[in-house]
Amino acid sequence: IAIISEYTTLQPGDLIAMGTPPGVGHAKTPPRWLKPGETVEIEIEGIGICASPVVDEAEHRAAATAQPLTA
């Protein structure tokens, strides 16, 4: 929380979803890793669902560095 609050102002009620460290998927039987096209969801009953798509890292980097369109 201390590190995150260095970069953003946290408010009462804010949630921090961090997931798991790299490499823990191999410990499952059978091993399981997230794949592009899947969705990670967190839900708070009575409030709603936050859904985040899993994307290919190379495609994400290419999209993040794309130049904006100009008129």
Image (cartoon, helix red, strand yellow):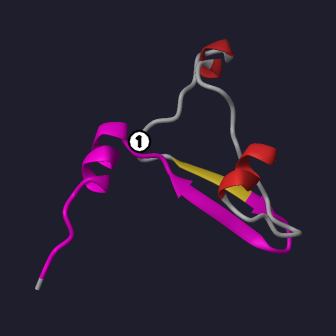
Q: Is residue 55 magenta?
A: yes
Between 66 and 5, the residue placed more toward the observer is 5
Left or right of 58? Residue 52 is right
Q: What residue type is labelled 1?
A: Pro
Kindly give the residue lying farthest to the bottom in the view shown: 71
Is 30 located above or below residue 53 in the figure? above
Is 22 located above or below residue 26 in the figure? below
Say which element carries label 1.
Answer: loop
Q: Residues within 10 Å of mark 1 (few under 14, many from 20)?
A: few
The percent coordinates of residue 54 (x first, y second) are: 47, 46
Is 52 located above or below residue 27 in the figure? below
On the image, numbered disc 1 is attached to which residue?
36
The percent coordinates of residue 52 (x first, y second) are: 55, 56
Q: Is residue 53 magenta?
A: yes
Q: What stretch is highlighted in magenta?
A: 43-70
The percent coordinates of residue 7 (x first, y second) are: 65, 55
Left or right of 47? Residue 62 is left
Left or right of 44? Residue 3 is left
Between 21 and 44, the residue placed more toward the observer is 21
Kindly give the residue lying farthest to the front in the view shown: 6
Residue drawn at x 65%, y 63% as measured from the top left: 50
